[in-house]
Image (tube, coloured by chain):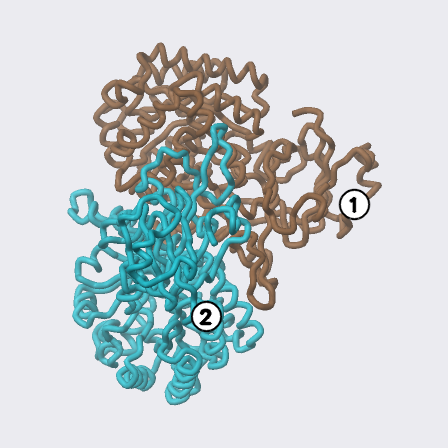
Chain colours: A brown, B cyan
Amino acid sequence: MAGLKKQVFIGTFISSNDSRNLDYLHNTVICVDGEGRIVRVDKEHGTSDQPEETLLRSLGWELSEVDIHVAKPGQFFFPGFIDSHVHAPQYANVGIFGKTTLLDWLEKYTFPLESSLKDLAKARRVYGSCVRRTLAHGTTTAAYFATIDVAATNLLADICLEIGQRAFVGRVCMDNPAICPDYYRDESAAEGLDKTRQTIQHVREIDPGFKLVSPILTPRFVPSCSSESMRGLADIQKEMDLPVQTHISENEGEIALVAQMFPESGSYAKVYDDHGLMTRRTILAHAVHLSEGEAQLIAKRGSKISHCPCSNSSLTSGAARVRWMLDKGITVGLGTDMSGGYSPSILEAARQAALVSRHVAMGLGGADPDKERSKLSVEEVLYLATRGGAEVVGLEDRIGGFDEGMEWDAQLIGLGSVDEDGVADRDGNVDMFGWESWEERVAKWLFNGDDRNVNKVWVKGRLVHGREYKVGCGDGENGYT
Amino acid sequence: MAGLKKQVFIGTFISSNDSRNLDYLHNTVICVDGEGRIVRVDKEHGTSDQPEETLLRSLGWELSEVDIHVAKPGQFFFPGFIDSHVHAPQYANVGIFGKTTLLDWLEKYTFPLESSLKDLAKARRVYGSCVRRTLAHGTTTAAYFATIDVAATNLLADICLEIGQRAFVGRVCMDNPAICPDYYRDESAAEGLDKTRQTIQHVREIDPGFKLVSPILTPRFVPSCSSESMRGLADIQKEMDLPVQTHISENEGEIALVAQMFPESGSYAKVYDDHGLMTRRTILAHAVHLSEGEAQLIAKRGSKISHCPCSNSSLTSGAARVRWMLDKGITVGLGTDMSGGYSPSILEAARQAALVSRHVAMGLGGADPDKERSKLSVEEVLYLATRGGAEVVGLEDRIGGFDEGMEWDAQLIGLGSVDEDGVADRDGNVDMFGWESWEERVAKWLFNGDDRNVNKVWVKGRLVHGREYKVGCGDGENGYT
């Protein structure tokens, strides 16, 4: 990634100030060095299309050595989205779940597809489309579950590095023959741990220092794992200080199964804790039906939660209580959870997080003081999609905002406009009439925006996605260099 | 509309057989006459790109006088969607609702915008974009609430006729000074009724026989209407046999208000019934909190319900129990309810109907036999979007399917594909790998499809929408004439 040109971005930058407020920086300049790092945020810039001599001089930069990117009026830069829970192999199944719930969904749709990706040509097709499609939706960082297959997992890491998406790539560990089918299971805990080490070693070879792609330890979920497997993964975690990702308390049948398998632990969360997997670097997906005690344990251990509203609604898992989690001091981000979730888009996850929070509110009595509080605002769900997700994956110092010292993981958002006869420019599904405040523009984007509004995407300073068919936005016509 | 060329459509046609099953007709020919009527459905066609001589001869048609439209492999024709509840003036506000619920949402966002559309230039802009945008999403029929303004309401009817969307256009009646603001209200019941007659007369002049555009009587909702106004509208209904549209039981505060205003009626539904407005031609939007008795009354009267899941979730109104309504024998269709609902798309409404039905299921205990039954399938929500909606607006004999004798209100759907390296053709948000069954293709379309998949839209045989930027689908390149 080194050796990029220095870059200067000029225009409106919107990002989360804190969990409840967006920061709107207009007429601002952000300078990004050749390593993709934000070295200067200049809020006093004015409306010029050129950075000031004095700014560049203070950085020791020459105008001739920088690429300048200017957002047009109405466009804005936004931090890249972080998908803190997604199954790359399942991308081929998005939208296909019928009326199943978690356990029969795994058997009917998911294990057969995942297993089939040991065919590397098929894996390349599915993983390539997943990485490109999520990037097109503005996802600059993804925490991926791959499959149990070493070669296919390594291929996913290769593809992320090649295309340029920041990623955590985990080989899935699942060795319990009572739950995992014969055709798709680690032969033993030892074999699973060995294969996991092979994928870690591969990522170490292709991206030393894990600058863009990192391995992540991935016990699928308690029912699929032996104690030996979970303990072995905890040992690797301590040995290498790696992140961990898994599922927790998604579905009532699953929870009953866990209680039956590990009666001595007393709760789903405690099973992970008893096996050394409840760490500060652990991402717990779903967490729909947590008890008070489990939430307290998670908060105490500093583990993080990935909220997956599309999936939780689709598979009839439940409505996760995000406000309740936040009140406990737990860090929360968003996950698409494809293909339990039907959408590759974190914007859709944010939209559904807002809607599902209203379903949580509906479930409370009219006099309950938490009824109104349960609702998540536009600002809050966009926080979850960016800074919240960054903290969930442990990169809050590097991504999720536009702070000096962070890396340039960003998307350029453009919204359409309507002329006097009501004819829209067809540039996406968001129509602007021109009288909207910036807050209203962002609300319209959240609720009707899609990948058509994502004009360009950068990861660590590198342009990794651009729309080909953008009306009036071809390179050279709109101020981009 | 008369004087269209005769048309022949060849390819795959998918439509609702009954409320639980889709009918997949492959290698089929549908012949549409110059009035836009389906005169022949030939299921034995084979794979030729030309209609057979014998078929044309049996219709008395010459090959030279027909336009032939061939769906490419993977594309399919689907009935146009029916939006049975939508506020055209509110289109400019989609996505903008903050944390409001119904009554403060009306005051804060909705009445000011609606009132401002007495400016006809602004009305043209908003209505034009609403009609074009909903057509682009495949909505061939819409039941529109306009505003209280006669000229602006007439303009909406003009625009629908000009652009070619089948529509019901209603001037909104609201004369209760206790609820309606001074700046946006009928001066009296008499004035409101007179203005309503003016809009009916206008539609009669521009579309005699209401072949494409029809007036619809539109008391906004009980709280905004005097008894005199509701009775007057009921009189017009009987006099002219017109359809009626209104809201019912959307929000708990609204229901309490109605109980306070009309204590003698005993229920929200009974208020409409007591005023003669609960007819077979009445569309009741929302119906979230109906009692058993109200549902029985609605079923007995043969009134219809427009289910608006996007709106009900956004405004924290509640989760409407569609299975429960269907079990009572009530006819149900879908409404976008913009801008209580955030989306112009009935496909999005269908998707949310599926998800919200799962939230209804989540609210029931695990042992409740209705838990599993509450869930709506892919096939069922697409039924609601087409045949269900057709019945709600009273046009079940003319639209919603591909039966002989119906009119050609249809959309041509195309889905994208992924190549061997995982590169998608970028033609929308739905990626096909080629191994999907037709049922799976439809599920993928429901959950990730959008207006990009709507290649062409016809109403009553007339092509009213086509995508300009379709990859590899320009006219002349894909078999279209």
Image-based side of A17 in relation to B456, left or right? right
The x and y percentages for residue B111 are 47, 72
The x and y percentages for residue A398 are 60, 32
Q: Which mark is residue B160?
A: 2
Q: Residue at x 49, y 47 (%)?
A: A380
SS type, badge 1: loop
| Image mark count | 2
How packed mark 1 is, by other alpha carbons closer than 10 Å (few <14, some 14-19, many 20 or more), is some
Q: Chain of mark 1?
A: A
Camera-side residue of A423 and A197: A423
2 vs 1, front mark: 2
Q: Looking at the rendering, in which quadrant would you find the N terminus of chain B?
A: bottom left
Q: Is residue A454 above or below residue B183?
A: above
SS type, badge 2: helix
Q: CA distance from mark 2 to mark 1?
A: 47 Å
Image-based side of B282 in relation to A166, left or right? left
Circle 1: residue type? Gln
Q: Which residue is mark 1?
A: A50
The x and y percentages for residue B308 are 34, 60
Circle 2: residue type? Cys
Q: Residue at x 31, y 26 (%)?
A: A112
Q: Chain of mark 2?
A: B
Q: Residue at x 40, y 36 (%)?
A: A338
How packed mark 2 is, by other alpha carbons closer than 10 Å (few <14, some 14-19, many 20 or more), is many
Q: Residue at x 58, y 29 (%)?
A: A164
Q: Is residue A236 above or below residue A309?
A: above
Q: Could one spot residue B104 in this view of the protein? A: no
Q: Are marks 2 and 1 on the same chain?
A: no
Corner quadrant of residue B142: bottom left
